[in-house]
Amino acid sequence: MKVLQFSGPFVSGQTITIPASIDHTYVHIGLQIPNRQPIGKVEKYSLPYSSPLHPTDVEINGKAYRIVNNILEFDKLAQVSWEINILQDLPMGSVIDIVYKDSDVT
């Protein structure tokens, strides 16, 4: 497996596009924002919602997420491409990791 890594800071309105490739399949995505304080006890995990007090941070392939507890990760994926839209400025030290494996193309 191999990793694509993008390092912040990221600015609001920035888009990271990883096009489809016949050579590999994306199996994991992880986003980390350093020093992010949890918003409240109810929000134990990153949630796909937004409110004026708790806006979302990123949109991944059309679904928006607010990242709480510093990390958002998805494993065991079979994604063929990515479009990541940054919805809020994210500080230096923010990282986006995308893991892919070579496809069995014969």
Image: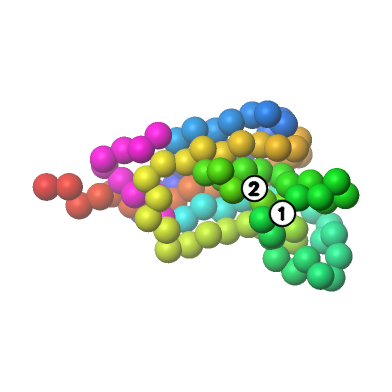
Q: Residues within 10 Å of mark 2 (few under 14, many from 20)?
A: many
- Provide the residue designation for mark 1: 49
Front-most of residues 27 and 87? 87
Which quadrant of the view contains residue 14? top right
Upstream in sequence: badge 2 or badge 1: 1
Residue 10 is a magenta residue: no
Question: What x and y, as percent, mark residue 95?
Answer: 62, 45
Point out the stretch of residues depicted in magenta: 19-27
Percent x, y of residue 22: 26, 40
Badge 1 element: loop
Contact between labelled residues 1 and 2, with CB atoms less than 8 Å apart: yes
Residue that numbered label 2 is attached to: 64
Query: 98 or 63, which is in the foreground?
Result: 63
Q: What's the residue at 75%, 61% (across, down)?
A: 69
**In the image, residue 25 lies in the stretch drawn in magenta:** yes
Does dot 2 land on a helix, a strand or a loop?
Answer: strand
Residue 78's place in the image compared with 21, above or below, is: below
Going by the numbered disc 1, the residue's amino acid type is Tyr
Q: Dot 1: few (<14), some (14–19), or many (≥20) neighbours within 10 Å?
A: few
Number of the label disc, if any, that sits on residue 78: none
Q: Is residue 21 visible?
A: yes
Above or below — where is 14 with respect to 59? above
Q: CA distance from mark 2 to mark 1?
A: 7 Å
Instruction: Indicate left or right for 67 with 84 as reference.
Output: right
Horizontal side of residue 76 vs 9, given as left or right = left
Q: Is residue 73 left or right of residue 23?
A: right
Q: Is residue 99 above or below residue 6?
A: below
Q: Write the residue at 55% across / 33% down.
A: 16
Residue 71 drawn at (x, y percent): 67, 57
